[in-house]
Amino acid sequence: MAKTCNVALIGQGFMGRTHSNAYLKVAKFFKLPVQPVMHTVFGMKEEDPQAFADRWGWKHSCTDWKSVIHNEEIDYVDIVTPNYMHMPPAMEALAAGKPVGCEKPIAGTLADARAMVEAAKKAKAKTFVWYNYRRCAAVALAHQLVKEGKIGRIYHVRCIYLQEWGGPDTPLLWRFQKKLAGSGAHGDLNAHIVDMARFITGDEIVEISGAISETFIKERTIVAAPSAGGIAGGAKGAAKKGKADVDDAVLFLTRFKKGAVGSFEASRLATGYQNQNGIEVHGDKGALRFRFEDMNYLDYWDNTVERRLQGWKRIMCTSGGNHPYVGNWWPDAHILGYEHGFVNQAADIMRVLGGEKPEVPIPDFADAYETQRVLEAALLSAENRCAIKMSEVK
């Protein structure tokens, strides 16, 4: 019998559902050194955490997150609160010597993120950040192909994350308030594609330039009815309006340490795109192309074959034993979906907690802090209308 790990979930909402679903399923599909036990979920009183616990299979619920963390039965703390609330429970758990995971970005501000990294170093506890797109089979395969030298010297990295849900009828959710979210589309969406670019290329960004940040909708109706569990689905606004003080779109250019150049674009107002998370990597030996709205496929260009045979090859990344993670799921070509990235991440976390290696690298607080530094540099570049070297952002 595998050892068990009592998990505490700090928060509910959209991410609470995805993480709960992952813990429910992971031991059924993966052979793990440690099996998660859904011990306690924290939620505010008005959220009715007991109802959430009953629906998603948590043994206990609580409205006091500190008591949850200090419960001697809890082995691992997983944080899915709004960004501004990542640091307090993370610091509390690290002080108690417990491993911690949290949703991305690591924190609402660079200062909070830095404090979390320092606390993790001092505690010497394992930490994890849920950059779930690393766990898509196609993205993990792209990482492996670059590492194997299939793309050669990288010239260009082109990244987009485009959504349309943040139009003028969407009310003033926490994601549109700087004090709660830290930033808007930038921290929500650019965080994912910056991490993905760093992960796939194995390279680091050294300079940001040409950044633009824009808030198109500066006032939104105050929330009268909360979301029904998605990002904004079912949320309704009242007549009264409040200030939306985060970005709706941020675009910027980068230079990488090994010489490549990159472009990043994130928007919640890209009409026609529901969840288009994409990356292209172009090198002297080949190229890769991924789009999350068709997440089971990776496009590959082999520049080493004779010219008459060159062309984009579409790889269906569903072959067990050949593509990352999918051997734990269904027969070849029985495609996977959004939830599977979270289950795959839960598996990797349990592997690490059990002393094994993850399928592909999993970001800890220190790794996620590097992405947070890039996000900060891009906002500084947009604000000051100048290039920002990463060495200037500590």
Image: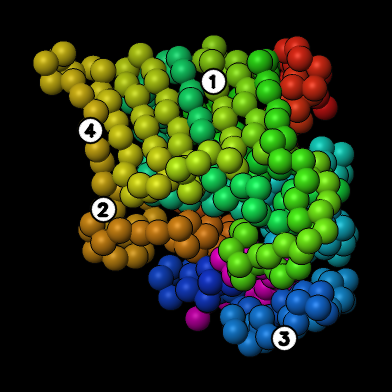
Asked if the residues shown at circle 1 and circle 2 are in contact, with their CB atoms under 8 angstroms apart, the answer is no
Position in image of residue 26 (x %, y %): 48, 70
Relative to residue 313, is residue 235 drawn left or right? right
**Residue type at the position of mark 1:** Gly
The label on residue 319 is 2
- Identify the residue under disc 4: 313
Asked if the residues shown at circle 3 and circle 2 are in contact, with their CB atoms under 8 angstroms apart, the answer is no
- Identify the residue under disc 1: 262
Where the C terminus falls, by quadrant? top right
In the rendered view, tell whether residue 52 sits above or below residue 316: below
Q: Residues within 10 Å of mark 3 (few under 14, many from 20)?
A: many
Q: Earlier in the sequence, mark 1 or mark 4?
A: 1
Q: Residue at x 23, y 58 (%)?
A: 332
Real-space Cα distance between discs 1 and 4?
A: 23 Å
In the rendered view, tell whether residue 218 sits above or below residue 91: above
- Identify the residue under disc 3: 50
In the rendered view, tell whether residue 22 sits above or below residue 221: below
Real-space Cα distance between discs 2 and 4?
A: 16 Å
The stretch drawn in magenta includes residue 81? no
Real-space Cα distance between discs 3 and 2?
A: 40 Å
